[in-house]
Image (cartoon, rainbow, N blue to C red):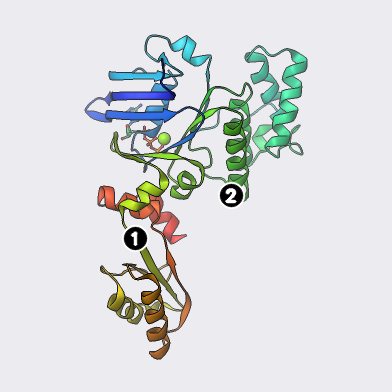
Amino acid sequence: MNDGFAVRAEALEKRYGAKRALDSFDLAVREGTVHGLLGPNGAGKTTAVRILSTLLRLDGGRATVAGLDVARQPREVRARIGLTGQYAAVDEVLTGRQNLEMFGRLFHLGRRRAADRATELLEQFDLTDAADKGVGAYSGGMRRRLDLAASMILAPAVLFLDEPTTGLDPRSRGEVWESVRALVAGGTTVLLTTQYLEEADKLASRITVIDQGRAIADDTPDGLKGLVGGDRIEVVVAARSEIPRAVKVVSRVSDGEPESDDEELRVHAPVTDRVGALTEVARTLQDEGVRVEDIGLRRPSLDDVFLRLTGHRTETTQKETAA
Ligand SMILES: Nc1ncnc2c1ncn2[C@@H]1O[C@H](COP(=O)(O)OP(=O)(O)OP(=O)(O)O)[C@@H](O)[C@H]1O
Ligand SMILES: [Mg+2]
């Protein structure tokens, strides 16, 4: 019995020596949804995915996938899942098409069916032009798409995607997102790990935030954003030298200390009276001759949520913010 949950983990434990990679980790993924597992480097995302996909033994707790116990029924679990690992599993020597045909044959598709499926997937992942080139000559993004295509050969009931878009350019990333959405529309449940806050927000209907092997939050994207409460006013100035004056202006209307980002030339702070704050800040900045590129209100991001939950920013976030 799975009670409408495609994946359930209760108090999972995994230790590497003294290191607790998973520390009483809980997870519940509803059937037919994309569930985001969001966390920074080393949080335990890959460990969780490897346990749930039966590649790694758990040290404690219990997990089911498609209603089957991963420790007691690993073969049955494997028949119902697909997995895209964090690192590409495709063969360098073969072409993209040969890789997909090979995976198709491994999954017992007949020669004809494997070839047709390969063609479909190459098309879906925009690899048709490169289909007959050796994978050794593929870019990182192309490899990633091929790897994803390989995990989708049988359109599995549950698909685990471990950081499927890490290293992809924005266009390829968008294409992967589209494929994931199409897959879920076709009935597959997806557990997607990511360090990209935007990705979890865009794709997932529910998000578990993992930090140091524990689930520190489990909520909808909107619910998580609600944790940090309210909107923020955001001012982007024209030069770094303008930041101190912008901070001063913003602090007059904000409910908390403004924060600033020297790289992005951004000053932001929480506000309650949206329109009042926006109007006053815009007017005062103009009166004082502060050179402004942009000014606006924004809803809290998952980045803000992570900071609130853990007291620290993620490494990824710092990189994203600086980019
Ligand atoms: N085979 C291993 N031996 C020892 N320690 C390990 C091993 N695999 C993972 N760990 C440790 O367990 C913790 C969780 O690692 P895991 O790979 O699950 O994190 P992650 O969330 O997937 O990180 P990333 O975002 O970098 O992929 C880390 O501290 C990691 O160093
Ligand atoms: Mg990982």
The residue singled out by tag 1 in the image is: 230
The percent position of residue 78, horizontal first and vertical second, equals 50, 15
Element type where label 2 sits in the image: loop
Residue type (three-letter) at the residue carrying disc 1: Gly
Dot 2 beta carbon under 8 Å from ligand 1: no
The percent position of residue 93, horizontal first and vertical second, equals 66, 27
The percent position of residue 2, horizontal first and vertical second, equals 41, 19
Residue under the point 40% across and 75% down: 278
Q: Image check: 315 left or right of 93?
A: left
Element type where label 1 sits in the image: loop
Q: Is residue 91 visible?
A: no
The percent position of residue 239, horizontal first and vertical second, equals 44, 78
Q: Residue 49 is drawn in which quadrant?
A: top left
Residue type (three-letter) at the residue carrying disc 2: Asp
Q: Nearer the viewer, residue 46 or 203?
A: 203
Q: Nearer the viewer, residue 184 or 101?
A: 184
Picture layout, residue 79 above or below residue 7: above
Picture layout, residue 263 above or below residue 312: below
The residue singled out by tag 2 in the image is: 169
Number of other residues with Cα within 10 Å of mark 2, as a class: few under 14, some 14 to 19, many 20 or more: few
Q: Residue 248 is drawn in which quadrant?
A: bottom left
Q: Nearer the viewer, residue 3 or 140?
A: 3
Q: Quadrant of the N terminus?
A: top left
Residue under the point 47% across and 40% down: 204
Considering only order in the chain, which callout, 2 or 1, is on the residue closer to the N terminus?
Answer: 2
Residue under the point 37% across and 13% down: 71
Number of other residues with Cα within 10 Å of mark 1, as a class: few under 14, some 14 to 19, many 20 or more: some
Where does ligand 1 appear, by image quarter? top left
